[in-house]
Amino acid sequence: MAIKNSIRALPAANFDAAGLDATFKPMYVGGLPFPCALLRMVNASDVAIGISYGGAVVHDFLPSGGVLEISLPGVYQNFNGGQFTKGTQVYISSSTGAAGTGLIWLTGYSQEI
């Protein structure tokens, strides 16, 4: 397969912080719709969140107003780097266990093959 000189954008997902508690909630039901080499999460809420890629443990932390961007090696170059696979679940939870106000956003990008 030849790599195309184009970028595919993941449809933006958002989660209302009013629905947060101490349990993990998925950002995409069914996981990512396609592989992504770059993920960006924006916490436009008033509560800090924990991020999990399996729903069992916190892998990252994002404070209120924070931005997390994970760009895997090789993205937008020769695509020899890694990717978050199709179906990867990205979960969030309130770091304090309490709900908040505002939205948490998730976007992503992949080079088309």
Image: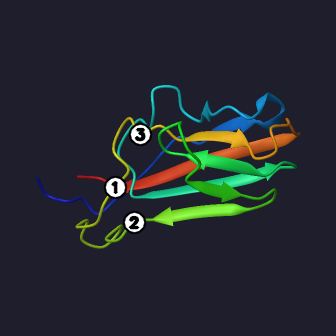
Secondary element at tag 3: loop
Of callouts 3 and 1, the N-terminal one: 1
In this figure, which residue is indicated by the disc labeled 1?
83
Q: Residue furthest front?
A: 57
Secondary element at tag 1: loop
Instruction: Using the numbered discs, state the Cα–Cα distance from disc 3 to disc 1 in whole angstroms.
Output: 10 Å
Of callouts 1 and 2, the N-terminal one: 2
Of callouts 3 and 2, the N-terminal one: 2
Depth order, front residue of 49/110: 49
Report whether 72 appears left or right of 42.
Answer: left
Q: How is the image coloured?
A: rainbow
10 Å crowding of disc 2: few (<14), some (14-19), many (20+) = some
10 Å crowding of disc 3: few (<14), some (14-19), many (20+) = some
10 Å crowding of disc 1: few (<14), some (14-19), many (20+) = many
User: Mark 1: which amino acid?
Assistant: Gln
Q: Residue furthest left?
A: 1
Image coordinates of residue 37 in percent, x first then y, are: 39, 58
Answer with the quarter of the image where residue 82 lies: bottom left
User: Mark 2: which amino acid?
Assistant: Leu
Report whether 86 appears left or right of 69.
Answer: left
Instruction: Using the numbered discs, state the Cα–Cα distance from disc 3 to disc 2 in whole angstroms.
Output: 15 Å
In this figure, which residue is indicated by the disc labeled 2?
72
Q: Residue at x 34, y 55 (%)?
A: 83
Mark 1 in CB contact with mark 2 (< 8 angstroms)? yes
Depth order, front residue of 67/2: 67
Instruction: Using the numbered discs, state the Cα–Cα distance from disc 1 to disc 2 in whole angstroms.
Output: 7 Å
In this figure, which residue is indicated by the disc labeled 3?
88
